[in-house]
Image (cartoon, coloured by chain):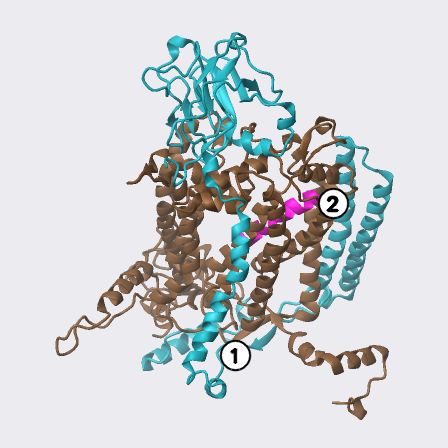
Amino acid sequence: MTTSTGNTAPTTRTGKAADYLDQRTSVGSAVKEFARKVFPDHWSFLLGEIALYSFVVLILTGIFLTMFFVPSMSLVTYHGPPASMDGQLMSDAFASTLTMSFEVRGGLLMRQIHHWAALIFLAAIVTHMMRVFFTGAFRKPRELNWLVGMLLMILGLAAGFSGYSLPDDVLSGNGLRITDGVVKSIPLIGSYLSYFLFGGEFPGEHIIPRLFTVHILLVPGLILALIALHLFFVVLHKHTQYPGGGRTDKNVVGFPLFPVYVAKAGGFFFVVFGILALMGGTMAINNVWNYGPYDPSPVSAGAQPDWYMLFLEGSLRLMPGGAEFVTWGDFTVPLNVLIPAVVVPGLLFTFLFAYPFVEAAVTKDKREHHVLDRPRNVPVRTGLGVAFLTAFIILALAGSNDLIATHFHMSINAITWAFRVLFFVGPWFAFWVTKRICLGLQRKDRELVLHGHETGRIVRFAHGEYIEVHRPLDEQERWLRVNYPAHAPLEIEPATDARGVRRKGYKKDKQLQRLSRFFYEDRVEPVTPTELAAAHSHGEHDALEGAGHARIEAGAGAGVGGRASSSSRRTGPTSAGPEVPAQ
Amino acid sequence: MSDYQNPRSPESSHREVGHREQHGTLETFPDPGLPEHKSRMADRDPQAAKRGERQVALLFGISVIGTIASMVVYFALPPDGTTSGVRLSTLSLGLGIAFALLGIGFGAVHWAKVLMSDHEKVDERHPVASDAETRAVAVQELEAGVKDSGIARRGVLKGAVISALALFPLTIAVPLVSSVGGDWNVSKFKHTLWRSGTRLAIDPSGRPIRAADVTIGSVVHVIPDVSEEERQSHEWITEKSKAVVLLVRLDPRDIVSTQAPQGEDWAYDGIVAYSKICTHVGCPVALYEQQTHHLLCPCHQSTFDVADSCKVVFGPAKRPLPQLPITVDDEGYLVAQSDFHEPVGPSFWERLK
């Protein structure tokens, strides 16, 4: 192509610039494709955005901090504010952290914004994952993007941990020491892995520079690449949408990228940044000069890691020591560390990695899903998610067992024992309760669809009977409650074929079926038009002409789960309302 | 929304349901389509639109003021080196920046919500999978490429390429791995600075401890007595990480047991010294409770009984804290009889080797 076509030659300045750019980049087709791309709107879609924007804030403030931080463990005698640190021997890393806090203008603010942004970053990732999990947004075609998200969360943990350790203060040093202890517990290679990390014995003089490279180059580089992939998938798949009238797996309903989301999402970046600045300005965090430079001897009681590490800390605290043992040949296997620090998080993460594939297998569902599930409509998934969160929260609380003990004047031993029991009982109980609540909500939905809203209006019939008038759902309300698939457990081929020959793979099928039964045995089917018609015509359909504009209707009869007895309406099979529609 | 606005009233849909049901065709409800659009104040009333516009402009104005304010306080409130001065500077600067950012953010969002079109658009989705034809062409292209390369026919070539690519990373991995762990001499875990005759000194001052100066019930944080110079060197922190000791003087009658083998005495007149490094994951075991003689690790609450060989009484640690055998020298100073008799700190695979 040499020139633009003559009859569309631009005349305005903007037009000329656009023409110049387009002839070199074909930006026109990209604009055509993306400018008015539709995105659905919902507050819960902002959680991922918060994660993205906190990451941007982390990079911006992080660049500021790298200008002043010295990633070195060389020892210096510090001279400067605050008075308590003046004249102390410390590493360059700690000294430069003090200097950037006390002498660089805005330095402490940037440090605090950076730290808060890291906490919010991980909180947003976790809540975003919860949204995706509970609404089933990980289903086909988004399973791979779920994996990308999982990797992003793990990298987020790595970024947080490596950054937390950089100032080389007493708290973070003890954190590293615990890491060293955990690494050493790994059978066979533990000691060597510890040397690999620390460049020799703990703490040595290499760990801070190494963590610095991990923190500012390796991990953020990977995070950036995976964010790009994550968002590429979002654009490719188009965003999921919540169920509602006119929203199907074949369309996407929402507002155009330009101008609505340019303003909303762009504005939201500034909101997130603004709130982080507010937090950094008003809430002190990680005042390292109160802890002092790292020294292997002191440790402060009541020390807590950042929140995202609490579950690991709690896991370590809960494990009884007896699990450590010595094998034949005098090799030590510290299961008291391996199980809580490696096996437990390994199991938790494996569950998250595997879940989309397990659910797809037990559902035998090969369709694409773009309309989100209401959590109640998939009771076992919702139950498993809540059970997972319960385990996570119990571990995190166990990570604060000392603070709970001192704040509530309780025995730390009793608290630890309580958490040990809760870790096993809590998730199971949470699963059961959540599943029951979901089924109950589904039954309530059925009830509403079949019989409408209670209006509180009691009407007396000519023959003396009282009923409460019910108002039927409008189409949108009803559609929301009936438009979902209630999956049934898998049906499998019999063990033998027609001639009695045993079938290969039957055993595997049988196991899958058992799992499928766990998922879908208890289910509440959505109301069908037939059922609605039946509910309206069993001689119990008492309709009145209401005082207002609406046609008011009284429903009756038992739903799937039986009726709530709070409703005083009890119509016998022979009773007839004043106006029975034709059947 | 009242019923008459609905395209189909419940009555008519009900009849339809009844009718179709007789033929058994309608198993699910029909999609009612998008809900009716509700117009906003600003869509109906130009006055409200004008008001919205003023609000948006005001929010952006607040941002400008925030930026100016942050510049003013930046120059007006330089940090003076005191903690409160730094706090004030951080607070004022933070508030300025927050207003500058939130003004832009809320302004843009408010603009989008109040003034921009709120008519929902519908885009079609297409299956993510490419269609059969595209796939067929893709497979053809790949097959043609494989054919062109001849890789399928040339087994030796395939083997050579795979070997070269698989082996090449060694050129980077070997030098890296050989150097990244220092000297890889992991037996260093098993030795500390303590030698026979090394005096016990107070941490961090380094003053040697006289047995007579330790009163019953008191607890002392101890390091090996080395020169001031050595304590300023970089190796010190690594050695200190293994060598720190907690010294407690008990009433000798309270001592149930020590780790000393038969015929040896590792304590001196009720004074016992145990490694301060937790046998769980290595935190310093720093909290001592006088009444119960219990030592508590603040990291994971492993609890050790000082009067009874520092055995674990609660928590995630399995092994007792190793005991440092001590005695006194001619001048009455506490000294070590030897190094620890086992590696201190967390367990590892070859610990007993």
Q: Residue at x 78, y 82 (%)?
A: A19
Q: Amino acid at mark 1?
A: His
**Residue in the picture at 65% in, 35% down:** A288
Name chain B's colour: cyan
Q: Which residues are magenta?
A: A111-128
Few, some or many residues within 10 Å of mark 2 (<14, 14–19, 20+)? some
**Chain ID, mark 1:** B
- What residue is disc 2 on? A68
Q: Nearer the viewer, residue B259 or A365?
A: B259
Residue tagged 1:
B126
Looking at the colours in the rendered structure, which chain would you say is drawn in brown?
A
Question: Viewed as shown, does residue B33 lie left or right of A388?
Answer: right
Q: Position of residue A364 (x, y in %)?
A: 35, 70
Image quarter (top left, top right, bottom left or bottom right) of the C terminus of chain A: bottom left
Give the chain letter at badge 2: A
Question: Which numbered disc covers residue B55?
Answer: none
Q: Nearer the viewer, residue B155 or A163?
A: B155
Q: Residue at x 73, y 49 (%)?
A: A64
Q: Disc 2 residue type?
A: Phe
B107 magenta-colored: no
